[in-house]
Structure formats: C-alpha cells, structure tokens
Image: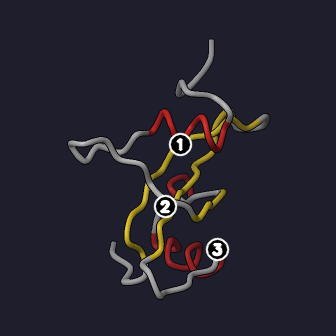
C-alpha cells in the first residue's frame, strides 16, 4: 500500500483498557500536502480490521542513524511508556 501524501509512517501498540493494546499510526505527511484522520482511515479500509489503526497522530517519525524507527521514543511520547508492555 502506498499513499502519495505520506512521507513516513510508524505503527505502535498503545495500552487500552478493553483490548489490552490498540494499533496506533504515527504519520508524517509530505511538505505541502495535507491529510485528515478520516482520509487515512479511508485509505486503510483495505486492511483487515485488526490491522487498521484505532488512533492516528500526525508527527515526525524518529529514526536512528541506520534508518530504523525508534519505537521506544514513540511509545514514550504517545503512550507514556518506553517498553512495549508492562508486566
């Protein structure tokens, strides 16, 4: 899947009381373009329901020097925790 308005994207799980975790997308839109949450969710309609994001944030996607997405930074920023889960 590809969208011409999206420059970069990351997906993380954030805690949810009912489901345990929900899929959350962090989207970086290309300069000069605009995108709404509804547009993105419509674009994701082709995905199975369990893979579709329940929450969407528009922000930069941090990467380390080798290009790998820094998911602990995203979890800390958007879920308030650095680990993927707490025991």
Residue 78 x, y percent position in the rendering: 64, 44
Pair 1/2: label in front: 1
Examine the rendered structure and indicate whether residue 19 appears above or below residue 25.
Answer: above
Report the residue at 63% width, 28% height from top: 81
Check disc 2 and report the residue beneath it: 48
The label number, if any, that marks residue 74 in the structure image:
1
Marks 3 and 1 in Cβ contact (< 8 Å): no
* Residue with the mark numbered 3: 37
- Direction from residue 30 to residue 40 in the image, left or right: right
Residue 56: give x, y in percent of width and height.
62, 61
C-beta proximity under 8 Å, tags 2 and 3: no
Q: Earlier in the sequence, mark 3 or mark 1?
A: 3
Instruction: Residue 29 in the image: state x and y as whole percent.
Output: 47, 74
Q: Is residue 81 above or below residue 57?
A: above
Badge 3 marks a residue whose secondary structure is: helix
* Residue drawn at point x = 44 percent, y = 81 percent: 31
The mark nearer the N terminus, 2 or 3, is: 3
Q: Quadrant of the C terminus?
A: top right
Q: How did the renderer colour the structure?
A: secondary structure
């Amino acid at each position: 899947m590809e969208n011409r308005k999206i420059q970069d994207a990351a997906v993380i799980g954030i805690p949810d009381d009912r489901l345990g975790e929900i899929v959350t997308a962090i989207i970086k839109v290309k300069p000069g373009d605009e995108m709404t949450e509804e547009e993105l969710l419509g674009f994701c309609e082709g995905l199975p329901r369990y893979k579709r994001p329940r929450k969407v944030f528009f922000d930069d996607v941090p990467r380390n020097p080798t290009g790998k997405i820094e998911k602990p930074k995203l979890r800390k920023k958007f879920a308030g925790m650095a680990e993927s889960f707490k025991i």
